[in-house]
Image (tube, grey):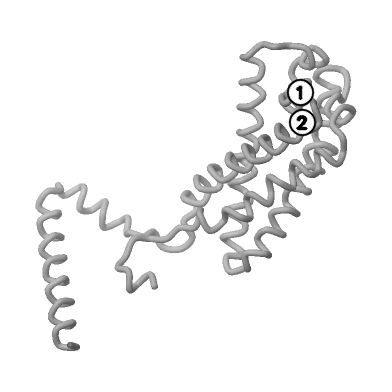
Amino acid sequence: MADRREEIEQEIARHRRAIAVLESQLRGPSEVSTATRRPWPPPGFYFTFYVVAGSILGILGSLTSFLFNVFGSLMVGQDPYYLLRVYGTVFLGQEALRTSDLNFFMLVAVVHFSVGALAGAVFHVVVNRFYPDISAMARIGVGAGYGVLMWLVNFYLVLWWLEPALVGRAYVLELMPVWVAALTHVVYGVTLGVLQPVGRFVPYGPMEARA
């Protein structure tokens, strides 16, 4: 059985060498040199991958927190788009609470998901670069803490002065209940923590090598 296994492995190695030769014949000299300069998988921490993956996870986290708020609003008989309206006061002031313009809602949604993507990329890079081996519960806990940190920074270091400077009044801080704002950001952060394994870089290789 062991001899048969060794024969199979040698045969696979021969085929791989033959394929490599054929591929080198298809490529020109410049392509061959480029491939030589860029080994796969990339050595070290694959920063670009984690930025892109983190951005996607951040968008999913923003979507989760938004849906959480929508369903919560429906349960208490409130406007399901109230969250977007309140955040939209940064652009339109009090008019955002009354408008039905679809373009307005699209603008607020794009900004909401863009901020979520940026924050998700930062979280994903930091966690996987410095704390790649923490447990699942620790990831969720760190994600929840990150959500709280985002809430504090966004609301009390940015919006408290930015919105009055833009529209003359801090509508977001006045109209958004503290517990709702905090919980919405915690849901975002927990989603990032839960989805961390999905965004891990796993280079292609034989199943035995990945086991």
**Chain-order first, disc 2 or disc 1:** 2
For residue 73, the mark is 2
Name the spot of residue 137 as percent of width and height, x first. Answer: 67, 64
Helix, strand or loop at label 1? It is: loop
Which quadrant holds the C terminus? bottom left
Q: CA distance from mark 2 to mark 1?
A: 6 Å
Name which residue type carries label 2. Ser
- 16 to 28, vertically: above or below: below
Q: Amino acid at mark 1?
A: Asp
- Disc marking residue 2: none
Horizontally, is 44 left or right of 31 in the view? Answer: right
Q: Residue furthest bottom?
A: 2
Residues at badges 2 and 1 in contact (C-beta under 8 Å)?
A: yes
Q: Secondary structure at mark 2?
A: helix
Task: Write down the quadrant of residue 16 in the picture.
Answer: bottom left
Q: Would you name the residue on which mark 1 appears?
A: 79
**Image spot of residue 20 (x, y percent):** 15, 60
Task: Give neighbour class at mark 1: few <14, some 14-19, many 20+ (Cα, 10 Å).
Answer: few
Which of these two is toward me, 38 or 166? 166
Q: Is 19 located above or below residue 4 in the figure?
A: above
Q: Position of residue 193 (x, y in %)?
A: 63, 55
